[in-house]
Image: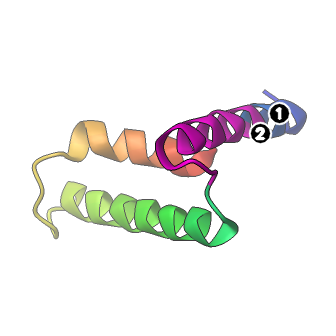
Amino acid sequence: MDMKEVIARSKAIRDRYHQLEIQQNGQSWSAEQDALAFLTDAALVGRFVMDKEASWPTSQTDTSLSYKIGETMW
C-alpha cells in the first residue's frame, strides 16, 4: 500500500467516525476532541506495551494492544 492509498483510507475511516459522532452526539468532533482521543489512545498503547514488558499490569494486552495501535494509525 502506498502513501496515497494510506491517506485515502485514513480519510474514509475519519468520515465514518464523523458519521458515528453525528449519530451519537448530533455533531462531529472538534479538532480538540480528536486530539484528546488520540492522546488517550496513544497513552493506552504505551500502557499495553509496558504490560507486555511486565512493568504495567493489565489483563487486556493481546487484543487491546494491536487494536489500539491500529486505531492510532488511521
Against 18, residue 48 (above or below) is below
Q: Residue at x 66, y 35 (%)?
A: 13
Magenta run includes residue 43: no
Q: Where is residue 15 shown, x and y percent of the image?
A: 71, 37
Q: Where is residue 35 shown, x and y percent of the image?
A: 59, 69
Callout 2: few (<14), some (14-19), or many (20+) C-alpha neighbours within 10 Å?
A: few
Q: Secondary structure at mark 1?
A: helix
Q: Are circles 1 and 2 on residues that touch, CB within 8 Å?
A: yes
Q: Which residues are magenta?
A: 10-28
Q: Which quarter of the rendered picture does the C terminus lie within? A: top right
Identify the amino acid type marked 2: Lys
Q: Secondary structure at mark 2?
A: helix
Against 63, residue 37 (above or below) is below
Please tell me the numbered disc located at residue 11.
2
Magenta run includes residue 16: yes
Please tell me the numbered disc located at residue 8.
1
| 31 or 2: nearer the viewer | 31
Q: Residue at x 26, y 65 (%)?
A: 50
| 19 or 52: nearer the viewer | 19
Question: In which quarter of the view is residue 51 placed?
Answer: bottom left
Q: Main secondary structure of the magenta part?
A: helix
Please tell me the numbered disc located at residue 65.
none
Against 34, residue 65 (above or below) is above
Q: Where is residue 29 shown, x and y percent of the image?
A: 61, 57
Q: In the image, 50: left or right of 33?
A: left
Identify the amino acid type marked 1: Ala
Q: Which quarter of the rendered picture does the N terminus lie within? A: top right
Q: Residue at x 68, y 42 (%)?
A: 14
Q: Single out the residue that lies furthest toward the right.
A: 4
Question: In which quarter of the view is residue 45 placed?
Answer: bottom left
